[in-house]
Amino acid sequence: MSPNFRPYRTEDDFWAMREFLRQVFLLNNRRERSWHVARLDYARWHVFPNCAQVRLEDVVFLWESDGQIVAFLLPDGDLGEAHLCVHPSLRTPALEEEMTTVAEERLAAVAPDGARTLRIWASEQDALRQDILARRGYRQDDWTEHQWRRRLDAPLPTAPVPPGYEIRALGTGLELLERCYASGLGFHNGDIQIAVDNRTDPSWYRNIQNAPLYRRDLDLVALGPEGDIAAFCTIWFDDTTRSACFEPVATVPAHQRRGLGKALMVEGLHRLQRMGATTAFVGGYTHAANALYQAVMGSDHERYESWIREWSPHPPER
C-alpha cells in the first residue's frame, strides 16, 4: 500500500518528525542520509522564523502509513530547495518520484515571469535519487556539503588556546548581545551594520535558545584580550542517539588565523565525550570551513550534492 500524503498540520507533527529522524539516523548507521534531529530543531527555531520567516504549515509535507511517518519533505529555509527525509526500509522509487513531484509543485521558487527553480540534495552514494533527478532534468551544480563525522570513543586531539584568549560557555545578560554582534561580524565579513542590527534586537537568538536540544554549556565562545567575543560555536547534543552537531561555527574577521575555531571545536569534542556522546558531525560548504573541519574531525566524511532544475510553466512558442 502506498503511503498517504498530507501537509504538516499541528505541533504533534513536529514531535513525530523528531522521533522519526532519531529512528532513521540509527537505521542509517549514524549517517545523515536524512536530517539529524538537531537540524530540524535549528530549522524550526531559527531558520524558519528568523531567516526565511515561513511557517512549517506552509513548507513541510509528510507521507504516512498506518499513522506512522514514512517520509517528509521540507526546505532548509525559504522556497527554492528541498530536503527529502525517508525511512530507509520503506523507501521506493515511486515514493522518491512522488516526493520530487510535490517539491516541484509546492517548494520551487517562482520568478516574476513564472520561471521556476528548485534545488534538491542527494548523497554522493545515493544512486537512486541521482538517477531520478537526472531523468527529470536536474543538473548537478558546484554547491556541495561535506558532512564530516568523528567517533568519540577514541582519544581526541588537543588544540592550544592562543595567548590572551579564553574559551568558555556563553554567559548571561549583556554577553548575549555581544554574541549577537559577533554573529553579524563572523557571517557577514565584518559588516558593522548587520552586527549592530543583530545586537539591537536579540529576539532571534532567544528563539534559538528555546530549541529543545539547546544547552548553554555547549554554546561556546572564545573571548579576546579585550573581553570581546572573538569566535563562537554552538553544539547540539541528542542524548537519545548519543550524537551531536556543530552549528554554527565562526570567527570574527579581526581574530581569524589564530586557531580559535579549532580550539573551540576541540573543546566541544571533549565536552561531548565526557557527556557520553559517541559521534559528532559538522557540515562544511566552503574550502576554508572544510579545511578547519577536517583538521578537527579527521578524514571521515560524506559529500551531499545539490541538483538544480530550472523550468518555465509553459513550453516556449515556436
Image (cartoon, rainbow, N blue to C red):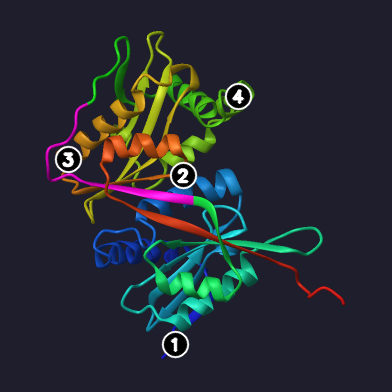
Q: Which residues are magenta?
A: 144-158
Q: Is residue 187 left or right of residue 261?
A: right
Q: Residue at x 22, y 49 (%)?
A: 279
Query: Which residue lies under the disc numbered 4?
Result: 191
Indicate which disc, 3 or 1, sits on the residue closer to the N terminus: 1
Q: Position of residue 106 (x, y in %)?
A: 63, 68
Residue 163's place in the image compared with 279, above or below, is above
Amino acid at dot 2 = Tyr
Check disc 4 and report its element: helix, strand or loop.
loop
Magenta span includes 124: no
Quarter occupied by residue 59: bottom right
Q: What's the residue type where badge 1 is placed?
A: Ser
Viewer-proximal residue among 140 and 229: 140
Dot in front, 4 or 1: 4
| Amino acid type for the residue under numbered disc 4 | Asp
Q: Nearer the viewer, mark 3 or mark 2?
A: 2
SS assignment at label 1? loop
Disc 3 residue type (three-letter): Gln
Please state the horizontal and vertical placement of residue 172, each as a whole percent of the image. 38, 24
What percent of the width, then of the height, locates residue 266? Answer: 25, 32
Quarter of the figure with residue 219 = top left
Q: In what quadrant of the picture does the C terminus appear?
A: bottom right
Task: Determine which residue is flagged by label 2.
Answer: 285
